């Protein structure tokens, strides 16, 4: 039997596609992009994926319902294999989508692939402006002011202002979105309680925190920009954490009350519920000059004279005996002439040792359980037995 016929082999075409990173463009409330959008053109998949070139059309758009407004477009003359883009922070405040098209030909008639990337912007932090509206002012996203019992908030990601007052602007440009009104009598008692931050007087509420509206920046200068709370650029004058009970204040006055488990910020001392005090850091009666220092690190008490010479010490001496370490108290007292030590006495639990410098002679004595011994320049001169 003879079979006759025509067979056709159809090869799958290689996939040509657009890759983007990240998949979504993220902006902060002030139109600052978190990372550049990277566009790459690829042929094939998996281990066979290779870079390719294409004619690119790149658009930044504002999409409202079915209406699309082109804010920016770029069409490189030559083929490209990659394209990186960052939205200018001072432009395209309403941008919410990026459209990308790849073509085989410069005339853009043979499309290879297309890709759309959403733009997501963070919500602003509401911030009150204490000054009245002025055409010369510049407002940031989330800043608001009160006029005629209405709060007007600047709701553009790009800082700016309008040439007429917020009320007049809204009446003339209802769809612009630059100013958003909030009727004061419809808010929840507080001026802006419906938003991320609630401001009542000079108290600001965010999540589990209540902080003061005033504070200091990283250099210690006064500031009221509480939008930077959580960074070193804003440390509030007062902080309450309702979740943990933490309380911090830079000028705290207490007239009474009971405090438990107190410790210093750097852990230099602690007071437990029983009233026991544990000192971890150095304690000194003065920064310099005559003073007494208590050192938990060396378990000692030291005395210094006006020349910073150590004139007294109470400390421990150690003794290793049959595998046991014993600690004994020891006391030093010294006398100086200028910076020269001329007298010293050392007292332990069982003996007293002392010396004096008289002219060029070094006089020493030792009093212990076996008697009293005198020496001069290292040689014994007299001994008194205990018997």
Image (cartoon, rainbow, N blue to C red):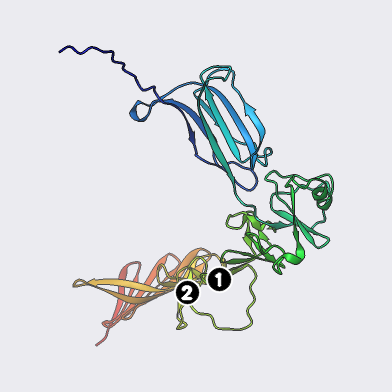
Counting from the top left corner in percent of width and height, residue 293 is at: 49, 71
Counting from the top left corner in percent of width and height, residue 255 is at: 64, 82
> Can residue 272 be seen here?
yes
Closer to the chain start, of discs 1 and 2, is: 1
Q: Closest to the observer: 101 or 32?
A: 101
Q: Horizontal placement of 132 versus 318: left or right? A: right
Q: Residues within 10 Å of mark 2 (few under 14, many from 20)?
A: some
Counting from the top left corner in percent of width and height, residue 330 is at: 37, 75
Vertical comparison of 230 with 277: above or below: above
Vertical comparison of 75 with 241: above or below: above
Residue ID for mark 1:
242
Vertical comparison of 56 with 322: above or below: above
Q: Quadrant of residue 278?
A: bottom left
Residue ID for mark 2:
270
Label 1 and label 2: CA atoms lie apart by: 23 Å
Nearer the observer: mark 1 or 2; the answer is 1
């Amino acid at each position: 039997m003879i079979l006759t016929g025509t067979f056709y082999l159809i090869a799958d075409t290689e996939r040509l596609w657009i890759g983007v990173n990240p998949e979504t463009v993220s902006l902060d409330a002030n139109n600052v992009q978190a990372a550049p959008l990277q566009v790459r053109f690829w042929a094939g998949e998996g281990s066979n994926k290779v870079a390719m070139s294409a004619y690119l059309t790149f658009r930044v758009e504002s999409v409202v319902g079915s209406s699309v407004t082109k804010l920016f477009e770029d069409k490189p003359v030559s083929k490209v294999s990659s394209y990186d883009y960052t939205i200018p922070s001072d432009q395209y405040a309403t941008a919410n989508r990026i459209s990308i098209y790849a073509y085989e030909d410069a005339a853009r008639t043979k499309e290879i692939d297309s890709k759309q990337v959403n733009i997501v912007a963070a919500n602003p932090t509401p911030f009150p402006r204490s000054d009245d509206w002025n055409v010369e002012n510049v407002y940031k996203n989330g800043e608001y002011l009160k006029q005629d019992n209405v709060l007007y908030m600047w709701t553009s990601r790009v800082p700016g202002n309008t040439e007429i007052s917020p009320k007049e602007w809204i009446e003339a440009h209802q769809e612009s979105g630059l100013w958003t009104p909030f009727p004061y009598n419809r808010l929840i008692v507080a001026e802006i309680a419906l938003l991320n931050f609630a401001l009542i007087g000079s108290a600001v509420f965010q999540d589990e925190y209540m902080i003061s509206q005033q504070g200091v920046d990283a250099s210690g200068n006064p500031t009221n920009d509480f939008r930077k709370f959580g960074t070193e650029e804003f440390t509030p004058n007062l902080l309450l954490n309702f979740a943990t009970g933490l309380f911090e204040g830079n000028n705290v006055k207490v007239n009474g009350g009971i405090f438990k488990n107190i410790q210093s910020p750097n852990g230099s001392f602690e007071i437990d519920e029983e009233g026991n005090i544990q000192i971890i850091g150095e304690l000194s009666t003065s920064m310099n000059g005559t003073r007494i220092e208590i050192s938990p690190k060396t378990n000692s008490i030291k005395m210094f004279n006006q020349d910073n010479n150590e004139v007294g010490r109470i400390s421990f001496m150690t003794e290793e005996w049959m595998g046991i370490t014993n600690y004994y108290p020891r006391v030093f007292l010294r006398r100086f002439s200028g910076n020269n030590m001329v007298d010293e006495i050392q007292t332990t639990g069982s003996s007293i040792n002392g010396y004096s410098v008289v002219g060029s002679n070094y006089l020493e004595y030792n009093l212990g359980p076996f008697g009293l011994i005198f020496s001069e320049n290292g040689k014994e001169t007299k001994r008194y037995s205990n018997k």
